[in-house]
Amino acid sequence: MEKKTGHRAQGTGVRKPERSQSEAAAEVVTAPEIRASKGTRRLVMVTAVDEPSARLADLAGVDIVLVGDSLGMAALGRPDTLSVTLDEMIHHTRAAAAGAKRALLVADMPFGSYQASVADAVRSACRLVAEGGARAVKLEGPRCDETAAITAAGIPVMGHLGLTPQAVHRLGGYRVQGRGVEEALRLVEQARALERAGAFLLVLEAIPAPLAAAVTRRVGIPTIGIGAGPACDGQVLVLADLLGLSDAPAPRFVRRYADLGRVVRDAIAAFAGDVRAGRYPAPDETYPSPPGLAAALAKHLGDD
Ligand code: KIV
């Protein structure tokens, strides 16, 4: 199916005419377009933490790039997401915004940036947009008042239900959520409430597949699953997991599409071997001497 966001044709070898600004703008993925895509196509979202990762995800044609607070583990060496600050999120969002030219760039609202008050939530969301360049924000849990207020401020909000890592201590660990009937029904209600509050998209993390399917059927906004089975309207993976960059044991839903950790290690080890053996740099990797420079240096410095 032709994407409304105007995926570029590749590899034809035919030079295409310059696109007008309005044609280029039509290619940019927007929150209203994502919301309206329900039932028309499967959405693809990956996380990114900097310009190269966002640029490569964008070039690969993903719909949404999420600067997730998983950057705490993926890029900052932290044990969890709780210590990631709003300033750190803004810093990484600004870097990712330089790479995500077409995909919708969404920034996670970190722990502590929206829990104390609705006013805090709006202020934090505004900073992620104004300073970071995000075009939407995501917050965890059934935060309907915050969702409504941020949306009213003009910022699209993505909800996040199920396993919400910022609540790890209340949840007692990173466990599958919604296994009991009562809890599952509550989650369906929370999803509907978030939709009513104005959320344009909903992440469902680590819940049984039938529950994700039930939520997906009962809301008019698309759902994006991570460990929530195949019935969601789209899927997300953390890029470090997808690329095999992380050493941590992966949850069962992670599929590794590359072993970049090994590729990177081998490349650095090969460089180290070449340096130590004197094989790097070679003559064609070295700036040659202008005529007479070597001789003049030897004369002035008294070298042999
Ligand atoms: O922070 C993150 O990477 C996320 C995704 C797992 C959805 O919230």
Image (cartoon, rainbow, N blue to C red):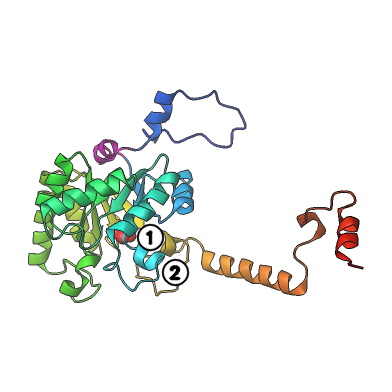
At which x and y percent is residue 170? 15, 73
From mark 1 to mark 2, how far is it between C-alphas? 10 Å
Q: Residues within 10 Å of mark 2 (few under 14, many from 20)?
A: some
At which x and y percent is residue 165? 24, 66
- Disc assigned to residue 188: none
Q: Residues within 10 Å of mark 1 (few under 14, many from 20)?
A: some
Tell me if residue 151 comes above or below residue 107 in the rendering: above
The answer to whether residue 256 is left or right of residue 124 is right
Q: Quadrant of ligand 1?
A: bottom left
Question: Residue at 23% of width from left, 46% of height from top?
Answer: 126
At which x and y percent is residue 13? 62, 32
Quadrant of the image containing the N terminus:
top left
Q: Nearer the viewer, residue 294 or 275?
A: 294
Question: Residue at 22% of width from left, 69% of height from top?
Answer: 176
The residue singled out by tag 1 in the image is: 238
The answer to whether residue 217 is left or right of residue 226 is left
Q: Amino acid at mark 1?
A: Val
Beta carbon at label 1 within 8 Å of ligand 1: yes
Does dot 1 land on a helix, a strand or a loop?
loop
The residue singled out by tag 2 in the image is: 246
Q: Nearer the viewer, residue 145 or 173?
A: 145
- Discs 1, 2 touching: Cβ within 8 Å: yes
